[in-house]
């Protein structure tokens, strides 16, 4: 990353999940981490129902507990940018942890840097593989159990799991148009504002 770097292509993979759940995006390097969180929520199809943290090196970025009741606090994600993580840690891989109960670990690989490019229209979803697991399924082990149960009509929990989860759940089918629309909506909300020139 140089002083002229404006964007980065990232490949984000949900750790310990089969079949693979992966998203490839281009995001501005100046994207605030709370907005990177929302971008990943949209790209994966999560519902933004739980807390999150970004981890790189020894650093943690998230939303601090206002009461400070839960030990050492993360750096405020609303006041830090993706470029801050890279500059402070030299990281080429960042972990995005979503839902501290289910512990969904998303491995973010920083694949390619872009210099002097426009950031209008970013973030942008380039590729998607694998459907996002249902919320509150129990993390990677719970998701594996869920897939076993819904895929086997003789499984003792087949009917319960089928009724609990989304209708017609296929882990290999991605509704890419819906994910793209969700990510594109963010780029519209966050597009750079032009400063008004003052009249003299």
Image: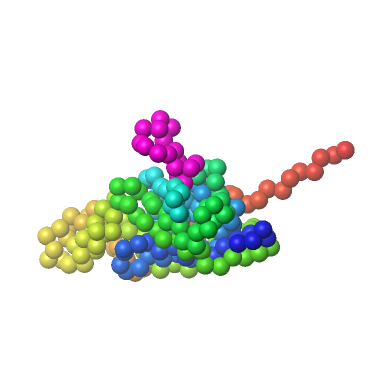
Front one among 193 and 179: 193
Above or below, 177 relative to 189? below
Total marks drawn? 0
Give the residue furthest to the top.
67
Q: Position of residue 122 (x, y in %)?
A: 59, 58
| Residue at (12, 66) in percent of width and height | 154
| Residue at (44, 42) in percent of width and height | 74
| Quarter of the rendering occupied by the N terminus | bottom right
Q: Is residue 102 left or right of residue 1?
A: left
Answer whether residue 83 is magenta in the image: no
Give the residue furthest to the right.
200
- Give the quadrant of residue 176: bottom left
Find the magenta span and give its range.
61-76
Front one among 57 and 100: 57
Q: Position of residue 34 (x, y in %)?
A: 50, 47
Q: Is residue 144 left or right of residue 68?
A: left
Q: Is residue 105 left or right of residue 62?
A: left
Secondary structure character of the magenta stretch overall = loop
Front one among 52 and 171: 52
| Residue at (41, 35) in percent of width and height | 65
| Quarter of the rendering occupied by the C terminus | top right
Above or below, 19 relative to 181? below
Q: Position of residue 3 (x, y in %)?
A: 67, 58
Above or below, 102 relative to 176? above
């Amino acid at each position: 990353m140089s002083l002229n770097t404006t964007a980065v292509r990232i490949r984000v993979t949900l750790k310990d999940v089969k079949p693979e759940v992966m998203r490839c995006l281009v995001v501005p390097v100046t994207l605030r981490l709370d907005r990177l969180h929302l971008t990943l929520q949209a790209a994966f199809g999560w519902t933004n129902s739980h807390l999150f943290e970004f981890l790189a090196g020894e650093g943690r970025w998230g939303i601090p507990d206002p009461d400070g009741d839960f030990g050492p606090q993360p750096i405020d994600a609303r006041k830090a940018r993706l470029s801050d993580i890279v500059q402070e840690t030299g990281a080429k891989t960042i972990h995005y942890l979503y839902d501290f109960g289910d512990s969904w670990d998303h491995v973010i690989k920083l694949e390619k840097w872009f210099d002097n490019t426009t950031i209008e229209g970013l973030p942008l979803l380039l590729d998607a593989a694998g459907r996002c697991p249902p919320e509150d399924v129990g993390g990677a082990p719970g998701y594996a159990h869920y897939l076993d149960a819904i895929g086997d009509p003789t499984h003792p929990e087949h009917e319960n799991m089928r009724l609990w989860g989304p209708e017609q759940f296929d882990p290999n089918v991605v509704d890419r148009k819906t994910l793209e629309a969700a990510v594109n909506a963010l780029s519209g909300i966050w597009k750079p504002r032009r400063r008004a020139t003052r009249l003299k």
